[in-house]
Image (cartoon, rainbow, N blue to C red):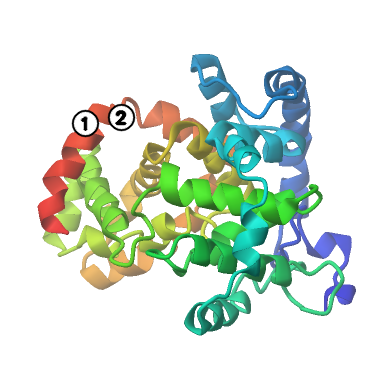
């Protein structure tokens, strides 16, 4: 199946393009995007260096918000997140987790989801293709599930690990690097997001509702009047960190910031998806219409243009103090 795909059929990450894909519009965007990222690569080269850590600063945060060049993304993510240091300090752990005896339930659940992971991507379409990433994906998820016994495996992890593999596919020790990025996400950056009761995800969905109330009371009241429950909104957004939801380049730009700034970045992205569709949502006259629109918010033109989306996240949204988010999370605990 993958042999039949031509270069024009897939994007740079191996995802099949829609039949009505606008090549002209894409080429115009890339003609602007690539030179910008080339200039940024020169700055990132000196920032990343040879070490396994990047000291976070306002400059680093600003650089991340403007985008990490694709060639430097693997190293930058590992260093920014702390995964590189953790990997260096535990050089044999991944192989030990892989060689351990895994529960049959864990293996069966993961095997079932492997076939559902990015079915429109050439690297995940077939097990027999020499370029296939299905086996590496299975290895990583089993090792992660075994390592984090309380969490085990949760749907959504497959899309995160799968996209990480696509970014790391040409790296040495790619499986081990993705394993450590996943482990760092689960334990350091997004603790409790993948706990069996998903309390942290549900909590951030409620916080999203309160942020909409703060930033746009009119829209919040309209959604409230129509019976919208925030615990039903955006579950997929948060659980897979927008992978398999937003265009790949936009997801990667969000992750550039996530590995640097943490979970607040996800709230900013979700808030942009809601607020940039304010007028459409206000025109909805019942719960069904709103629910249907929420399923397609990510398809808006703004979502397709990663520069515009990131600009909205950090400029149009305005201040989002961590102290206020922490207070909202505390207040929302009773709701979940």
Asked whether disc 1 touches disc 2, contact meaning CB atoms under 8 Å apart, the reply is yes
- Examine the rendering and report whether any part of residue 244 can be seen: no
Q: What residue is rendered at 80% in x and 65% in y?
A: 9
Is label 1 or label 2 in front?
Answer: 1
* Residue behind mark 2: 320
The quarter of the picture where residue 214 lies is top left
Number of marks drawn? 2
Q: Is residue 135 above or below residue 105?
A: above
- Examine the rendering and report whether any part of residue 37 can be seen: yes
> Along the horizontal axis of the image, is 114 left or right of 15?
left
> Along the horizontal axis of the image, is 289 left or right of 260?
left
Name the one closer to the observer, 106 or 121: 106
Identify the image quadrant of the C terminus: bottom left
Q: Is residue 109 above or below residue 69?
A: below
| Percent of width and height locating residue 112 | 56, 82
Measured in 3D between alpha carbons, the distance from the residue under mark 1 to the one under mark 2, in whole angstroms, is: 7 Å
Q: Crowding near pointer 1: few (<14 within 10 Å), some, many (20+)?
A: few
The mark found on residue 239 in the picture is: none
Name the one closer to the observer, 70 or 26: 70
| Percent of width and height locating residue 84 | 63, 37
| Percent of width and height locating residue 128 | 83, 79
Q: Crowding near pointer 2: few (<14 within 10 Å), some, many (20+)?
A: some
Q: What residue is rendered at 61% in x and 39% in y?
A: 89
Label 1 secondary element: helix
The quarter of the picture where residue 326 lies is top left
Label 2 secondary element: loop
* Residue behind mark 1: 324
> Along the horizontal axis of the image, is 70 left or right of 305?
right
Q: Is residue 226 above or below residue 322?
A: below
Identify the image quadrant of the N terminus: bottom right
């Amino acid at each position: 199946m993958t042999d039949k795909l031509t270069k024009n059929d897939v994007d740079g990450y191996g995802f099949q393009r829609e039949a009505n894909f606008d090549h002209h519009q894409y080429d115009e965007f890339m003609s602007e995007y690539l030179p910008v990222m080339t200039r940024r690569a020169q700055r990132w080269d000196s920032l990343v260096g040879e070490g396994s850590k990047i000291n976070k600063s306002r400059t680093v945060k600003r650089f991340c918000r403007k985008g990490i060049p694709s060639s430097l993304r693997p190293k930058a993510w590992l260093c920014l997140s702390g995964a590189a240091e953790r990997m260096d300090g535990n050089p044999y752990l991944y192989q030990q987790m892989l060689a351990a005896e895994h529960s049959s339930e864990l293996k069966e659940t993961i095997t079932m989801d492997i076939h559902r992971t990015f079915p429109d991507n050439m690297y995940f379409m077939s097990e027999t293709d020499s370029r296939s990433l299905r086996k590496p994906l299975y290895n990583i998820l089993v090792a992660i599930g075994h390592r984090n016994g309380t969490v085990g495996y949760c749907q959504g992890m497959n899309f995160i690990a799968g996209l990480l593999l696509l970014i790391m596919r040409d790296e040495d020790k790619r499986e081990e690097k993705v394993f450590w990025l996943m482990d760092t996400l689960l334990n350091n950056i997004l603790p409790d997001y993948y706990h069996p009761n998903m309390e942290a995800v549900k909590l951030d969905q409620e916080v999203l509702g309160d942020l909409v109330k703060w930033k746009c009371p009119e829209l919040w009241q309209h959604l409230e009047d129509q019976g919208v429950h925030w615990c039903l909104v955006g579950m997929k957004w948060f659980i897979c960190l927008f992978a398999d939801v937003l265009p790949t380049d936009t997801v990667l730009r969000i992750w550039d910031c996530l590995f640097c700034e943490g979970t607040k970045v996800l709230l900013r992205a979700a808030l942009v998806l809601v607020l940039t569709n304010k007028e459409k949502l206000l025109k909805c006259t019942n719960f069904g219409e709103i629910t249907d629109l929420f399923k397609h918010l990510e398809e808006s033109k703004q979502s397709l243009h990663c520069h515009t989306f990131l600009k909205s996240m950090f400029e149009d949204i305005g201040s989002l103090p961590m102290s206020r988010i922490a207070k909202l999370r505390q207040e929302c605990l009773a709701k979940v």
